[in-house]
Image (tube, rainbow, N blue to C red):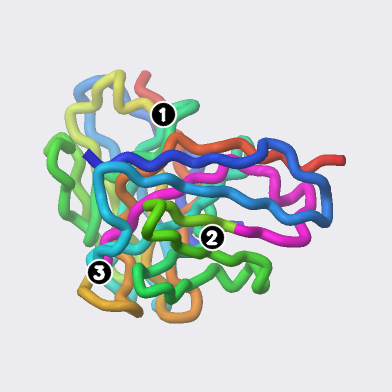
């Protein structure tokens, strides 16, 4: 069982927007502004798409955005494209005994 | 461009030690701005943080691994390594090495995103 809770799957049509939630606790997401999101295509390593809740690394599309409220972080993908179909994982810093915790992952299907 | 590459045996027997190495190119592992990390992913499942190490040698581990994991650095070879002892079938996974930015300079800083990642290496635990 993962430390952070994500929906197992979400879907959307091309051009639409979707949001993936990531729920933690006051020990992780609720206490730190250090949430990151990763995109993983089949057979490939994960790719960082969001860090520090909402910041995008250079080269990542501005269609990806992140936010946080309380113990829940969210990833929104706007203008869905076929290439966005992948698994998405959230991660949060969780303090000096646990360090980093991941969510169980969400499979995004572009219909 | 920073690149990481995992290497090691793809098959380990139960109760033995899994040993992997990550070779870094395009960067020094003696930078105080990063942790050098190991993360694994069992087949068809999610990601699990194993641990990371700072260039001065202090390492931080997932407590669920119950002290079975050891991460070490070899700056002269621009490599870092993972040893995981007393393995069982539950340790079968793709093992990734990755660089993590530190949130602030210094050992003990929180990590701040894993980027980049190696391609991963599948390690199967079986007799």
Circle 2 chain: B
Q: Are marks 3 and 2 in contact (CB under 8 Å)?
A: no
Q: How crowded is mark 1: few (under 14 residues within 10 Å), some or many (20 or more)?
A: some
Q: Do the residues labelled 1 and 2 touch (CB within 8 Å)?
A: no
Say which quarter of the image contains residue A61: top left
Foreground residue among B64 and A111: B64
The answer to whether residue B92 is above or below residue A2 is above
Q: Distance between the residues labelled 3 and 1?
A: 31 Å
Q: Residues within 10 Å of mark 3 (few under 14, many from 20)?
A: some
Helix, strand or loop for the magenta stretch, by majority: strand
Q: Which of marks 3 and 2 is nearer the N terminus?
A: 3
Tell me the quarter of the image containing the C terminus of chain A.
top left
Q: Distance between the residues labelled 1 and 2?
A: 21 Å
- Say the numbered circle drawn on residue B32: 3
User: Residue at label 1?
Assistant: A41
Q: Quick check: do tags 1 and 2 share a chain?
A: no
- Say the numbered circle drawn on residue B41: none
User: For the point 46% across and 47% down, which residue is it?
Assistant: B22
Q: Are marks 3 and 1 in contact (CB under 8 Å)?
A: no
Foreground residue among A18 and B27: B27
- Helix, strand or loop status at disc 1: loop
The answer to whether residue B70 is above or below residue B3 is below
User: For the point 30% across and 21% down, which residue is it?
Assistant: A83
Q: Quick check: do tags 3 and 1 share a chain?
A: no
User: For the point 30% across and 48% down, which residue is it?
Assistant: B115
Q: Give the range drawn in magenta.
A: B83-102
Q: Which of marks 3 and 2 is in front?
A: 3
Tell me the quarter of the image containing the N terminus of chain A.
bottom right
Regarding residue A35, the answer to whether it shows in the image is: no
- Say the numbered circle drawn on residue B50: 2
Circle 1 chain: A
């Amino acid at each position: 069982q993962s430390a952070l809770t994500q929906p197992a799957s979400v879907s959307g049509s091309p051009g639409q927007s979707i949001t993936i939630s990531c729920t933690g606790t006051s020990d992780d997401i609720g206490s730190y502004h250090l949430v990151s999101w990763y995109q993983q295509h089949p057979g490939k390593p994960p790719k960082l798409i969001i860090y520090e809740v909402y910041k995008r690394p250079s080269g990542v599309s501005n269609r990806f955005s992140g936010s946080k409220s309380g113990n829940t972080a969210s990833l929104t993908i706007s203008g869905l494209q076929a290439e966005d179909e992948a698994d998405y994982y959230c991660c949060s810093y969780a303090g000096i005994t646990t360090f980093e915790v991941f969510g169980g992952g969400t499979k995004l299907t572009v219909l | 461009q920073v690149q990481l590459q995992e290497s090691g045996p793809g098959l380990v027997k139960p109760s033995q030690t899994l040993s992997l190495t990550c070779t870094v190119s395009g960067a020094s592992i003696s930078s105080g701005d990063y942790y050098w990390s190991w993360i694994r992913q069992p087949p068809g499942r999610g990601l699990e943080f194993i641990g990371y190490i700072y260039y001065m040698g202090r390492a931080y581990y997932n407590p669920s691994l119950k002290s079975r994991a050891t991460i070490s650095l070899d700056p002269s070879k621009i490599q870092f390594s993972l040893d995981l002892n007393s393995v069982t079938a539950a340790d079968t996974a793709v093992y990734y090495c990755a660089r993590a930015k530190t949130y602030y300079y210094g050992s003990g800083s929180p990590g701040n995103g894993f980027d980049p990642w190696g391609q991963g290496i599948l390690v199967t635990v079986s007799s």
